[in-house]
Image (cartoon, helix red, strand yellow):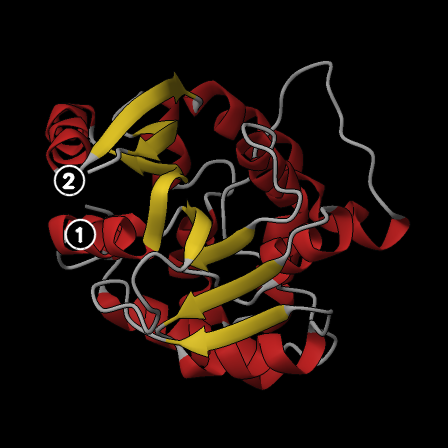
Amino acid sequence: MASFPPWVFRTLYWYMNKLDKHHQVIFMNFGYSEPGEKILLESEDEKNRYSLQLYHHLIKMVDLIDKDIVEVGSGRGGGLYYIARTCSASSMIGIDREKSFIDFSRKYFKHRNLYFLKGDAQKLPLENNSCDILLNVESSHRYRSMELFLTEVNRILRPGGYFLFTDFRYPYEWPDIIELFNNSGFKVLSEKDITSNILHSLNLDSERRTSLVKRYAPMILQKDILNFTGAKGTETYNYFLTCKYTYKSFKLQKQDV
């Protein structure tokens, strides 16, 4: 899928944990912006506005009150922490395979009924029928098997539960992804191409992203890590600009057996 070699991810994760002393990098998604629309944020969240707006775009699709929520691919925990602070969910569990991300999340994001677990998307460390809503934000394009992931999502969601999914793919891959959704026991309730919203976000946020890379990454790695961020002018940015990548969001529901 994405053209980033594995060493780029490993190096990026190492540098973030080593050098990000003031926990400035708590999101790793491309962000979302709807022209003319801005969500209300606390001052502490403003610097991460566009990444948070991607989460908001998803969670506004369902009622989170008193629900058990799981995020697979929770990264450094900022998205789920935002949900914990702003929505009256019953419980929230973030799962990521990177131990350093889980350690970071546990250290900096403490909230009632918010937990972080190390685990693989293809073998989730949760019981059957244990959550009402599952989030997956810009993570699945790196999974070894989308089919195994969807099997696990279906397993841990309660009947009638919601799967909120957003990510990018080559355009020709989407029909196969949607077929996998249908074959894995999900009904597609909504599907939206949000590529233009991702681009709008990157246009507005590129200066900040570039500044962070220049601050934390050594010169020899800056080009690759900038590409990872999708900053304006990079190959990744141009892939969205030319629609070589398309970015979609989905609301899916687990069907009763």
Name the residue that disc number 1 marks. 151
78 relative to 233, above or below: below
Kindly check if marks 1 and 2 are in contact, taking CB atoms under 8 A apart as contact.
yes
Q: Is residue 37 left or right of residue 34?
A: right
Tell me which numbered mark, 1 or 2, is placed earlier along the sequence. 1
Whether residue 206 is visible to the viewer of this picture, yes or no, is no
Indicate the position of residue 185 as horizontal and vertical percent values: 18, 36
23 relative to 129, above or below: below
Indicate the position of residue 41 as horizontal and vertical percent values: 82, 41
Amino acid type, callout 2: Ser
Name the image quarter holding residue 5: bottom left
Q: Is residue 1 left or right of residue 120?
A: left
157 relative to 74, above or below: above
- Residue drawn at x 60%, y 74% is 105
246 relative to 232, above or below: above
Name the residue that disc number 2 marks. 184
Q: CA distance from mark 1 to mark 2?
A: 6 Å
Whether residue 39 is visible to the viewer of this picture, yes or no, is yes
Q: Secondary structure at mark 1?
A: helix
Indicate the position of residue 56 as horizontal and vertical percent values: 62, 36
- Residue drawn at x 57%, y 73% is 115
Q: Nearer the viewer, residue 203 or 73?
A: 73
- Residue drawn at x 36%, y 20% is 189
